[in-house]
Amino acid sequence: MAEIAADGLPAPARKASLRTVVAASSLGATFEWYDFFVFGSLTQVISRTFFSGLNETAGYIAALALFGAGFAFRPIGALAFGGIGDRLGRKGAFLVTVALMGGATVAIGLLPSYATAGVIAPILLLLMRILQGFALGGEYGGAAIYVAEHAPAGARGRSTSWVQTAAAFGLFAALLVILVTRLVLGKVFGPTAFDAWGWRIPFLVSAGLLAVSVFMRMTLTESPAFEAMKAQGAISKAPYSEAFGQWGNLRFVLLALVAVMFAQGAVWYTTFFYAQTFMEKFLKVEPATINGLMMAVVALSAPLYVLFGWLSDKVGRKPVMLFGMTLMLAAYFPGFHMLARTLNPALAEAQARSPATVIADPADCSVQFDPVGKAAFTSSCDIAKSVLANAGVSYVNQAGAPGELAMVRVGMATIPSLDARGLPKDVAKAIKASVEAKVKAGLARAGYPAKVDPKRMNLPGAFAVMAVFAIAATGLFGPIAAFLVELFPTRIRYTALSLPYHIGTGWVGGFVPFTAFAIVASVGNIYAGLWYPFAFTALSVVTCLFLVPETKTRALDG
């Protein structure tokens, strides 16, 4: 048996300094998050490139769904790599994840477009997203556990919080590369170059990041806690059945999921992703402006992860996490209303002064949600609603007389819609275009802006709103790695930790942009989509307050 030190860990395992362990783990995670976030930040371009066969709203929803699909496979990757990490070691598991993630990202930059290859293009894109999600499912647990099992007991929150900053650095790098590429290509090749082919460059940059990531992780040794467990012959032979088949462990898996990870997924992805969708699609803010604003917010967030991780070492994980989720719960609706008033005040003023109403026979209306692009939306009600949804304008519904054509009321003006059911596609398209032209003209007369006015934008005000969101997200996320590592025993830690984390961030968080936008398209209110993250956050606040134990004093050798 290996020589055992006073803290119960094998003496030879302490080859790498804590600083080296944290740097290698965090930088590797940063590169993986970069790969994942490039896609999320280019949703609008990807929807036009790979879903050009769908209408505008359907294509955008499909691209958001594809972004979410990568997250959907994260729990599967968590199970696969969790079992490897608990039986064979932490290092090998997350070395494989970074190679798989980097390869899939580079491949996306080489895929043909829908115009070139037809339906095979989105299918290949879906497969790459699945590989990305599968790889990322094994990344977080490995990096968090590896750092925590090297860190001293009184500094686990601070040490593991650097793994959390990897998400901020990865997102910042993605936004920076996209912004620089967009600006350079715009000056050299013209304004259409980035959308035509330049969007591929941020994906291809991942090849260099992949090489650095693999090299750094190959220099690491195994986790000392795992080596101690291996030396004592205590490695789990069946981590899945232990983690999920024994109530003593399963209850903590469920508690971590509902009381913490539901809120984490909702809060973090609303802050850093749905906010971008909201600003671009509904507030009509230019992508370059959004990128600049988000880069400033992400830069602000980076030290906050470490601050809140350090604070959790002092006062406990639970109160810090509760602070973050409660702050966001209070900020969801007033914060997004404030974004509208600061970034596009003309829109907010027009909606208050001349609200839009769709007056229609309820039997004539369909749900404005078509992720596969098969619905025609050719009734008079559907045409009216789809025109407003595509314009990013909130509206309310009012029941009309049975059998009568729908109307759009903007302020005091009323614009009749038309019915195109049963007509040839080209005729239906022309009818819809005529209604759209009339509705847009009515919106313009009522003061609805076609695009944002840069002179009236209050960017410092918008930054202040986003800063509140960032404080909430980092307050919740900063201590999470230490909390999850401390919650589970060493034998099954990788498996038990990874599954709730990736269900929360993958299934709840990853689908925030898709689900929230779909709700808006269905209901008509641009703020209605916020009920999705609000509900998950509220559930976590209640369960965390009453059921979550404090973990900061727990030992990691159990």
Image (cartoon, rainbow, N blue to C red):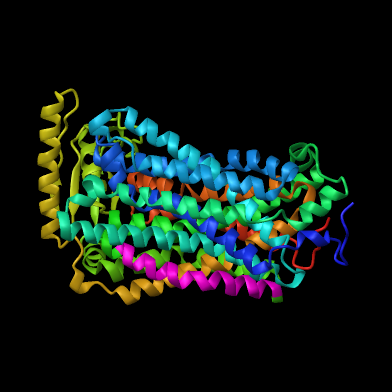
**One can see residue 71 in this view:** no
Q: Is residue 183 left or right of residue 223?
A: left
**Number of numbered discs:** 0
Give how far across and how far down residue 38 sits, in percent: 39, 52
Q: Main secondary structure of the magenta part?
A: helix
Q: Is residue 236 left or right of residue 55?
A: right
Q: Is residue 250 above or below residue 147?
A: above
**Frontmost residue, 109 versus 410:** 109
Give how far across and how far down residue 85 sits, in percent: 69, 45
**Frontmost residue, 453 versus 432:** 453
**Frontmost residue, 326 versus 399:** 326
Q: Is residue 17 above or below residue 94?
A: below
Asked if the stretch drawn in magenta spans residue 295, the answer is: yes
Residue shown at the point (48%, 70%) measured from the top left = 301
Residue shown at the point (39%, 53%) measured from the top left = 528
**Frontmost residue, 160 versus 553:** 160
Q: Which residues are magenta?
A: 290-313
Q: Is residue 410 left or right of residue 110?
A: left
Q: Is residue 365 above or below residue 425?
A: below
Q: Is residue 389 left or right of residue 233?
A: left
**One can see residue 84 in this view:** yes
Asked if the stretch drawn in magenta spans residue 406, the answer is: no
Give how far across and how far down residue 298 sits, in percent: 43, 67
Give how far across and how far down residue 554 sits, in percent: 80, 64
Quadrant of the image containing the C terminus: bottom right
